[in-house]
Amino acid sequence: MTTTANPWRDALNSLGSTFMTSTLIRSTSKDAGMPGSALYFRGRAGVLGDVSAEAAYDVMAIFSRRVVDSMWERSADVTPEKAVELYLDACRGWGRDHLVEDAAATRATELLERVLDEAALAPMVLAQGWQRAPRADDVPARLAQATMAVREIRGGLYFAALALVGLPVPRAMLVDPHAGPEGMASLGWNEEEIDEVKSSQRPGDAARWRDAERALDGAFVGLLGDVLGEDGVNELGEALLQVKRVGEE
């Protein structure tokens, strides 16, 4: 890569996930009769259809099972189709409110959508669902949706990389410097649950996590390269890092 920052962890994650905890998604959720956090769960997993809380947990394993069960129970009246519609509305609305339409945004959108059009994603079912979702017409909304969907690809590869090194997701979170106990608590894990994960830790967990991170970076950039080529991957990374937010100079 020719970029000096990591656009996959930094720019892609920020552009594709900030709406998930925004006031917009919380108000949209409440307007639909759900708790403020419920649309994140129902909408994100809604592309899988009418699935159980257990299936939703399997694809969103950074949360404790208790949290997913609670969100599923408290949003049971919302159909998957409606949840996806509302989730996409919030994602696109955030993009229109916060992203500047310029050459970098347009090019990043084009390249990300090309990945979504051409990448083979089986068995990453959550990423596959968002790969097939309908798209908006304007660049800010398309960019928000495309970064969200490609971020799901990276997330699916992350879970696969952890499985490859034999590291369960909760134990990975505990040794991840971007998460740790504080990060787990911010995602709804309670003290008892975190202590239970700590009790299952193994001495080699940190080394396994680093191995998984290296595998993830290689697999994700390789997937992008299969579609875009090396020059296209570099161009995408540079474009993502140049995307401007509304109000920036």
Image: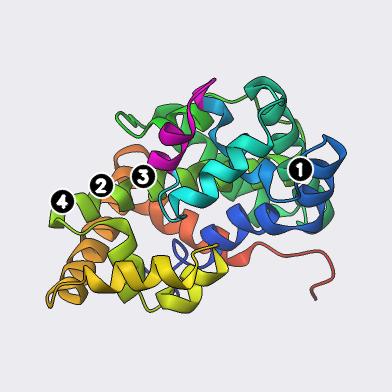
**Marks 2,3: beta carbons within 8 A:** yes
Q: Quadrant of the N terminus?
A: bottom left
Going from N to C along the chain, the mark reached first, 1 or 3, is 1
Question: Mark 3: few, some, or many residues within 10 Å (few <14, many ≥20)?
Answer: many
Q: CA distance from mark 4 to mark 2?
A: 6 Å
Residue at 46%, 44% (x, y): give it. Answer: 152
Task: Give the residue type at disc 2.
Answer: Ala
Task: Give the residue type at disc 1.
Answer: Ala
The circle drawn on residue 90 is 1
Nearer to the camera, 163 or 98:
163
**Marks 4,2: beta carbons within 8 A:** yes
Nearer to the camera, 3 or 171:
171
Going from N to C along the chain, the mark reached first, 1 or 4, is 1
Instruction: Say which residue label 2 marks.
Output: 160
Judge from the rendering whether residue 153 lies leftward or rightward of residue 217; answer left or right: right
Residue at 80%, 76% (x, y): give it. Answer: 249
Give the structural element (helix, strand or loop) at label 1.
helix
Nearer to the camera, 79 or 90:
79
Residue 32 found in image quarter: top right
Going from N to C along the chain, the mark reached first, 4 or 3, is 3
Q: Specify start and end residues of the magenta stretch as a single range.
A: 48-59
Task: Give the residue type at disc 4.
Answer: Leu
Instruction: Say which residue label 3 marks.
Output: 156
Question: Mark 4: few, some, or many residues within 10 Å (few <14, many ≥20)?
Answer: few
Give the structural element (helix, strand or loop) at label 3.
helix
Judge from the rendering whether residue 38 lies leftward or rightward of residue 96; answer left or right: left
